[in-house]
Image (cartoon, rainbow, N blue to C red):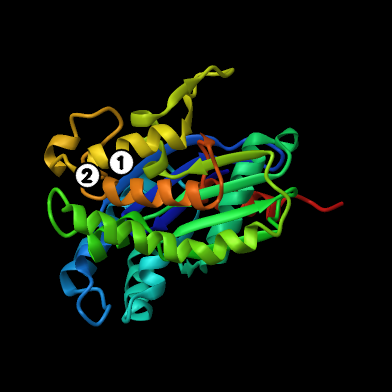
Amino acid sequence: MRLGVLDIGSNTVHLLAVDAEPDARPDPAADVGSTVRLMRYLDDDGAITDEGVETLGAAVRKAVKAADKFGVEEMVGIATSAIREAANGPEVLAHLSELAGVELQVLSGQQEAELTFLAARRWHGWAAGRLLVLDIGGGSLEIATGLDERPDFAVSVPLGAGRLTRQFLRSDPPTEEEVREAKDHAKKVLASVAKDLAKLPPPDHVVATSKTFRSLARLAGQQVAVVGPEERRRMRLADLADWTPRLAKIPAEQRMELPGITPERTYQIVGGAIVAQRAMKALGVEELEICPWALREGVILRRLDQLTPTT
């Protein structure tokens, strides 16, 4: 069966299509995304503006067209923090569901963390032991840890790369004061999470997902030798801490000349680097590995589990 996931996030609207069967690894068939950077389209009351709704609608129509082109037989639609928190979120969601031809499910922050954790667990396997999984989105940061396929602890905090950029990093490049305020804010938000995690056993393996982490790892990380064609990287806190202030001094247009910094990420990569650095420091993580699977793969895996016979 060709299964599709339509993911309406804070930064992109993304369609992932896979050939999926129970008990088999999902085989990617198509990956189509549109950059929307939804945080730009929030008014002072926290509602998505008319321009933002139009931008989202165009991206959804593009995804639906791609789903038809690639023969998607079943599509699951999800929306994350930007829609969840928008003052007019329910109205926008209804409009986008109509365009998509499928009911969009708004995931809670905990559900995002749990599904991303599932994807990481399936990718790394039981041998990885207790996992700690970090995922930076446009609007939120998800953190989860555990030994099984459902984490013992899962939380979402409002520390997305786009959110932090909109709140604090208003200049291009940001001023030293803006960067300092962003770092202090991230440290404050993460303090309670770090306290809760300190009560649990330490992880055996720390992994990070999302394009923000992948971009940062291509810039500040080291490639890992693995079996298969997929590139894998590790990133140390010391290397990220070295790159973050350097990134903050480079204008957005010039950052695209750096390895791993794509046009759709360049405007919020400093915010993403601050979140990543502060999260690693707060949680005592000196090094992490980038996991290729994330939320969309988790949604697919959970759907496949529902299709698998129990007897």
Q: What's under tag 2, amino acid-wise? A: Ala
| Position in image of residue 221 (x %, y %) | 42, 28
Q: Which residue is mark 2?
A: 248
For the residue labelled by badge 1, is the local secondary structure a helix, a strand or a loop?
helix
Residue drawn at the location 60% of the way across and 62% of the way down: 195
Would you call the spot at circle 1 few (<14 residues within 10 Å), some (14-19), or many (20 or more)?
Answer: many
Whether label 1 touches label 2, CB < 8 Å: yes
| Position in image of residue 213 (x %, y %) | 41, 41
The tag on residue 228 is none
* Left or right of residue 59: residue 22: right
Residue drawn at the location 73% of the way across and 51% of the way down: 201
> Residue 75 or 113: which is nearer the viewer?
113
Q: Which residue is mark 1?
A: 244
Would you call the spot at circle 2 few (<14 residues within 10 Å), some (14-19), or many (20 or more)?
Answer: many
Work out whether 218 lies above or below 156: above
* Left or right of residue 143: residue 200: right
* Left or right of residue 204: residue 98: left
| Position in image of residue 19 (x %, y %) | 55, 38
| Position in image of residue 39 (x %, y %) | 26, 64
For the residue labelled by badge 2, is the local secondary structure a helix, a strand or a loop?
helix
Please identify the quadrant where the N terminus is shown.
top right
Q: What's under tag 1, amino acid-wise? A: Thr
Residue 14 in view of the camera: yes
> Residue 28 or 264: which is nearer the viewer?
264
Distance between the alpha carbons at the discs numbered 1 and 2 = 6 Å
Residue drawn at the location 45% of the way across and 65% of the way down: 189
Residue drawn at the location 31% of the way across and 81% of the way down: 88
Quarter-of-image position of residue 115: bottom right
